[in-house]
Image (spheres, grey):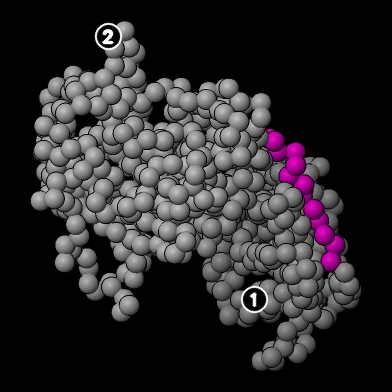
Amino acid sequence: YTLCAHPKIPGLVRLSSKSLEASPPFHSRNNCIVPRTLVNTNNMLGFKNLDVDLLLKEEGKRIFYDILSGKIEEDPTLLLRFLVISFVDLKNWKVYYDVAFPSLVLNSKMTFLRLHSASEVLSQEEETSLSKSMKVWRDSNETTGCPFFGVHIYSDSSVVIRQLKCWKGYSGDHQKLLFGFYDHGHQDYPGWALRNYIAFLSLRWKIEKVQFLCYRERRGEPDLEKSLIGEASFAAPHGWDGSDYVPEIIGWEGEKAGDRKKEKILKPIDLDSLNPASQDEEKQVMHLKLMGWRHPSLVLNKLRSARCLVLGAGALGCEVSRLLMTWGVRKLTVVDGGCVAIPDIVKQSLYVDNDCGVPRATAIVPHLKERCPAVEVEGIQMEIPVPGNPVSKTKMSSVLDNCKRLQALVASSDVVFLLTDTWESRWFPTLLCANENKIAITAASGYDSYLVMRHGAGPGHNLSTEDALGHQRLGCCFCNDSTSFVNLVLNETVALPGLTSIASGKAVELFARILHHEEGIHAPGDIAGMDTEHWLGLLPHQMQGSLPECALSTVIGNSSNDCNACSNGVLSEYRREGLDFIMKAINQPTYLKDLTGVSNNVIKLDTCLTLPVSFPVNSGKLSSV
């Protein structure tokens, strides 16, 4: 609530975003905080069906009871209580509202005996003293938020200003006693705040004749020329001392005493004039904000700032990239080495006919920007080196460059999605994620089955079998070949329609759950049937699905000591030799086999990773399934 600070502009009651904070800001010299009630409806029908008379009466009753109980003396701002009803049309960027300032209507006639400018009523000495005293009063932190006060003018023209709670000190040898208030009005009559002030003086202090000061300012200085001093008399109200009595309440804008509000007048605010790009971005994350209202644990800034690296821009890459934007991710890097072909148009959701022959990493960028202009997306055309495929000396330099670039991309990302067409092309990114301790998510589809899994945390600098939190490390996609479906072959060409969308959706959802889990990449694996307190649900290690069987199983697989991508032996050699190690793995087909004792395609029977009879799960959280 602000008092009048300009001779031609009234003061305002401002409702801002800070007004809705749990701990509103402190009073300042230029405004005081007043209690308010906001009633927001979910739709226009609910807004129109609000019982405005009942709402206004309830607010007025609060003022009335605060007067009788003496709360007003401790907190005078309670006399300025106001009410807002609203409907926010989020989809169309419009706000409809109405506002009421509840005022108690005295059942006895009030008469203004006189009303003049303060400079006309006060002597020069009194005016000077009042100006000085009001400046001190307004600048004091303890009194800034007190819009109602008493002004004592003594015979020597000195002025003392007291709070309402100091009522007992109001008796004395003062020559004049003015009941002052911060007046928002700028015209030649008092603002609406005087109504409840007089009701308070009459009901609480049994006064029947008062002199009042409508205090106004100009550019931060007392403006006694525009301030008003008046005198009013009013008979004591009748029947107000009844236990169930409630006076008449008015206050809807435009309403007068004795009238009844017959039809709500909608006051619209059109927000279409805001920055179009900002508006589009707000519309696109609206569903996330609605989720945040229901689940306060959703942190949009985490999603917005997450740097996602998508390896593969085929059917899985298109779906994952699009869904990441739906979750609010705005930093994407997409890597792919192929070009869009005619058969891809149907299967890969982002491409159109004109993209045929264009590198997928180039074609995907404008389609993502078209759907979400706020996204920062970079497309990189690059072949990912694979082990066991020797390269010629002429291509050695370009392969090394690709290795270095992929190292930098993984190091600068928060999460890496492994969505390439071949299993071998996921080996080097898997090794890099384990070494850098980055979140890695694999999604793969076969003819009628799919696999979605998160890789476990890296072994750290000490190459431990446990992660930083002491958990047994979860495996990567190369640790857990034996737990995958037998018929799971990376072949999107012959996959059942819809399989890619299912796998992509679960991969992105798995990322959101990891990001919001308190242990992040170190979170242990959950299995179906467990109870969880996490609002997004279970956080499994692997999800294996079969469309024909309508089945989804959750599997936990710990890291393997013989894994050719994340085992301690492999990472130790990589940290010791760097890219020389990678080039050996690429050019020597048996190098990883000799290093780990496991062939590239088959895991030894004696080291085959199988689920033990028991594994570390909090039995207290298992439901009785």
* Residue 266 image point, x, y percent: 82, 60
* Residue 272 within the magenta-colored segment of the rendering: yes
In which image quadrant can residue 489 be found?
A: top left
Q: Can residue 138 be seen in this view?
A: no
Q: Give the range drawn in magenta.
A: 264-276
Considering the numbered disc 2 on the image, is that residue within a helix, a strand or a loop? Answer: helix
Residue mark closest to the camera, 1 vs 2: 2
Note whether 318 is above or below 179 in the view shown: above
Q: Residue 393 carries which label?
A: 2
Q: In which quarter of the image is the N terminus?
A: bottom right
Residue at numbered disc 1:
62
**What's the residue type where badge 1 is placed?**
Arg
Q: Residue at x 38, y 38 (%)?
A: 418
Q: Which residue is drawn at 57% across and 22% down?
A: 358
**What's the residue type where badge 2 is placed?**
Lys
Spatial separation of the CA atoms under disc 1 and disc 2: 86 Å
